[in-house]
Image (cartoon, grey):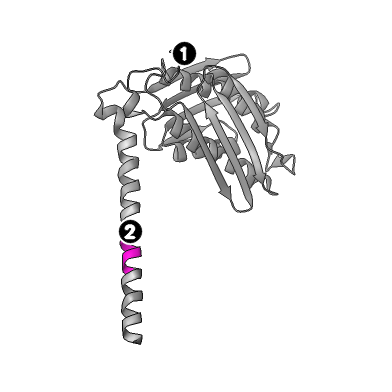
């Protein structure tokens, strides 16, 4: 009797492992198909490249929405570079950001202008937005922090921001600049963006969870919907 029970338990465990690994395999195939959809459908490369120079900063951003997560970020603000790597890695966006700014005053101008230029590069890469999924959302945990992001490439810029950092700085980075960065990105990419904090007591964790959730939402929203290729994803026919 015990041998039969042990045999049944073994079979159940074996079936679970088979189903689990098959699920992982399907997810990997899905990711590969999603990232290669533009090439399969013979669509033009979705690349944006913008240079913005003012009396305060000199910023250039080049990105490929259908990349693999390669990132070069040199803004003079180490924590911002770290967050840009999160966008690239988790959004599977090839990203090159080079910036020189008046950081001897503070990081505000450079942080904002990087957000502006990134938003403009996103807008350029998306073009007329035909065929994109348009909406994206993700819930990202990082230890005790939990942040939710939902976005819509609606053509109507808006930011609803709900991060509450318990400290004013993470290293030398002013945590108020997180909101300024996302305001700049949303306004210049014509994106509706909602960021909500569900939990968190560590400023670094809260911010990084927010950027990771943003990256995954961005990836979802900008992917090509094979059922809607060549169509504007709006009942109005325009975004």
Relative to 131, 143 lies left or right: right
Relative to 107, 22 lies left or right: left
Q: Are there few (<14), some (14-19), or many (20+) residues within 10 Å of tag 2?
A: few
Q: Is residue 124 visible?
A: yes
* Magenta segment: 14-21
Q: Are marks 1 and 2 in contact (CB under 8 Å)?
A: no
| Nearer to us in this view, 25 or 77 | 25
Relative to 162, 73 lies left or right: left
Mark on residue 19? Answer: 2
Q: Secondary structure at mark 1?
A: loop
Q: Write down the quadrant of residue 134 in the picture.
A: top left
Q: Can you say whether 84 is above or below 63 in the image?
A: below
Q: Write down the quadrant of residue 3 in the picture.
A: bottom left
Q: Earlier in the sequence, mark 1 or mark 2?
A: 2
Mark on residue 236? Answer: 1
Residue 105 drawn at (x, y percent): 71, 26
Q: Write down the quadrant of residue 161 in the picture.
A: top right
| Nearer to us in this view, 173 or 160 | 160
Give me the residue at 27% from left, 28% from top.
39
Mark on residue 81? Answer: none
Residue 181 drawn at (x, y percent): 61, 28
């Amino acid at each position: 009797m015990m041998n039969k029970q042990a045999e049944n338990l073994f079979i159940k465990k074996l079936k679970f492992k088979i189903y689990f690994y098959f699920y992982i395999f399907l997810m990997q195939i899905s990711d590969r198909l999603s990232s290669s959809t533009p090439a399969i459908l013979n669509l033009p490369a979705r690349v944006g490249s913008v240079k913005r120079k003012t009396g305060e900063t000199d910023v250039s951003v080049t990105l490929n929405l259908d990349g693999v997560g390669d990132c070069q970020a040199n803004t003079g603000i180490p924590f911002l570079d770290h967050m840009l790597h999160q966008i690239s890695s988790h959004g599977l966006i090839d990203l090159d950001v080079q910036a020189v700014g008046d950081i001897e005053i503070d990081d505000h101008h450079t942080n904002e202008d990087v957000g502006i230029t990134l938003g403009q590069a996103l807008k350029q890469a998306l073009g007329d937005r035909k065929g994109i999924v348009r909406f994206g959302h993700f819930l990202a945990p990082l230890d005790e922090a939990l942040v939710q992001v939902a976005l819509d490439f609606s053509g109507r810029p808006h930011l609803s921001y709900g991060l509450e950092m318990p400290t004013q700085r993470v290293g030398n980075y002013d945590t108020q600049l997180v909101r300024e960065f996302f305001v700049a990105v949303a306004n210049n990419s014509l994106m509706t963006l909602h960021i909500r904090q569900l939990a968190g007591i560590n400023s670094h964790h809260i911010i990084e969870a927010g950027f990771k959730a943003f990256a995954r939402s961005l990836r979802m929203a900008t992917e090509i919907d094979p059922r809607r290729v060549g169509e504007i994803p709006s009942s109005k026919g325009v975004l």
